[in-house]
Amino acid sequence: MAREFAKVFYRSQEWKRCRESYIRKMPRAKRGLCEECYKHGKHVLGKELHHKIWLNEKNINNKEITLNHDNLILLCFECHQKIHGKRKEYTTYGYDENGNVVKI
C-alpha cells in the first residue's frame, strides 16, 4: 500500500500512463513478467512497478524520479517484498551499480 504522501501520485493519470507505457515497451519475450525472476530463468507475472530510487516526500514531485523508465523495474510480489525488507530473511538486499538486486 502506498504511503500517505504518495497516494495522490499513484492515483494520477500521469502515473497510470507511465506504468502502462513501461510495460508495453518491455521486450516481447518478458513483457509483463517480473524482471528479477526473469534474470534467473523463472517466468513469474510482475505485479509491482518499483521505483529503484524510492519515493519520499522530497522527491514525489520530481518527474525524473517518479516517471522515469530508467528508475523503474517490474517485480512480482515476492521480489518487491524482498527489496523493501518486509520479510525478515530478506532485510539485506539492495541494488548493485548495474541495477541488479544483490545482498548487501
Image (cartoon, grey):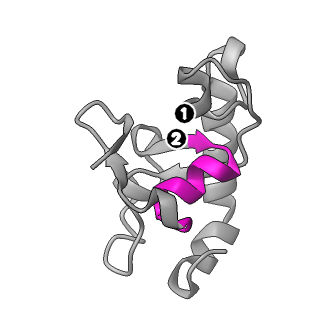
State left or right for residue 10 relative to residue 82.
Answer: right
Lateral position of residue 69 relative to residue 7, left or right: left
Q: At 40% from the left edge and 38% from the top edge, which residue is drawn? A: 70
- The secondary element bearing badge 2 is classed as strand
- Residue flagged by tag 1: what amino acid is it? Glu
Quadrant of residue 74 within the rendered picture: top right
Q: Determine the residue positioned at 52% across, 55% down.
A: 82
Please provide percent x and percent y for residue 60. Answer: 42, 71
Q: Residue furthest top?
A: 29
Q: Marks 1 and 2, Cα distance to the nearest angstrom? A: 8 Å
Q: Could you classify mark 2 by the number of other residues whose Cα lies within 10 Å: few (under 14), some (14-19), or many (20 or more)?
A: some
- For residue 36, the mark is 1
> Which quadrant holds residue 37?
top right
- Residues under numbered marks 1 and 2 in contact, where contact means CB atoms less than 8 Å apart: yes
79 to 5, vertically: above or below: above
Specify the quadrant of the image occupied by residue 22. top right
Residue identifier under label 2: 73
User: 10 Å neighbourhood of mark 1: few (<14), some, or many (≥20)?
Assistant: many
Q: Residue furthest right?
A: 45
Give me the residue at 61% from left, 75% from top.
2
Q: Position of residue 72 (x, y in %)?
A: 48, 44
Q: Which residues are magenta?
A: 74-87
**Residue 50 included in the magenta stretch of the image:** no
| In the image, residue 65 above or below residue 18 | below
